[in-house]
């Protein structure tokens, strides 16, 4: 896979995105190989990896939930739905459920503010969340 990455000029972000697309995350043990292939330091790669929130270094659950904590969602009491989801999954934001089926991530805008609060599971957006509708959405993905 690293053969596809152009090393001149080095595009660390594109390379990390390609690795994540292939594996679902960027394993930390791949950092030295990526750095060597691109002709940069391990620190350069780790700096980009830690800067971009969409890049992850741990294997995600089967389904990734992106829960919006933006101003519009907060104004419409998203915390109630979030609490219901965390209770149902047995994990908090930034964690994966004990059964490995869901990873719960925070975002600050899903571009659907008129229908707040919102979350996405995979590529499907769930608008106007309530605690009941949020937990019902989880059932569709079990």
Image (tube, grey):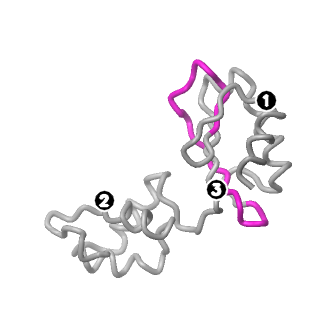
**Image position, residue 108 (x, y; %):** 56, 36
> Which mark is first along the chain, 3 or 1?
3
Q: Are marks 2 and 3 in contact (CB under 8 Å)?
A: no
Image position of 86 with respect to 82: above or below: below
SS assignment at label 1? loop
Quadrant (top left/top right/bottom left/bottom right) for the C terminus: bottom right
> Residue at position x 80%, y 48% from top?
86
> Which mark is first along the chain, 2 or 1?
2
The residue pinned by badge 3 equals 63
The residue pinned by badge 1 equals 130
**Image position, residue 49 (x, y; %):** 43, 62
60 magenta-colored: no
Answer left or right for 131 relative to 114: right
Q: Are marks 1 and 2 in contact (CB under 8 Å)?
A: no
SS assignment at label 2? helix
> Residue at position x 54%, y 44% from top?
123
**Image position, residue 89 (x, y; %):** 80, 54
Near mark 3 (Cα within 10 A), the count class, few <14, some 14-19 or many ≥20, is: some
Camera-side residue of 59 and 33: 59
> Which mark is first along the chain, 3 or 2?
2
The span picked out in magenta is: 97-119
Near mark 2 (Cα within 10 A), the count class, few <14, some 14-19 or many ≥20, is: few
The residue pinned by badge 2 equals 14
Answer left or right for 133 relative to 111: right
Answer left or right for 81 relative to 19: right
Q: What distance separates the C-alpha of mark 1 from that of mark 3?
A: 20 Å
Q: In the image, which is nearer the foreground, mark 2 or mark 3?
A: 3
């Amino acid at each position: 896979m690293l053969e596809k990455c152009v090393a001149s000029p080095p595009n660390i972000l594109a390379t990390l995105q390609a690795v994540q697309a292939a594996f679902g995350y960027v394993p930390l043990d791949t950092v030295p190989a990526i750095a060597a292939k691109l002709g940069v330091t391990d620190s350069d790669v780790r700096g980009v990896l830690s800067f971009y929130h969409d890049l992850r270094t741990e294997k995600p659950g089967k389904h990734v939930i992106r829960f919006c904590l933006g101003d519009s969602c907060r104004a419409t009491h998203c915390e109630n739905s979030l609490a219901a989801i965390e209770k149902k999954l047995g994990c908090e934001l930034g964690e994966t459920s004990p059964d490995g089926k869901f990873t719960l991530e925070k975002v600050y805008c899903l571009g659907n503010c008129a229908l707040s609060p919102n979350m996405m599971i995979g590529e499907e957006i769930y608008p106007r969340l309530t605690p009941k509708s949020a937990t019902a959405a989880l059932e569709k993905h079990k």
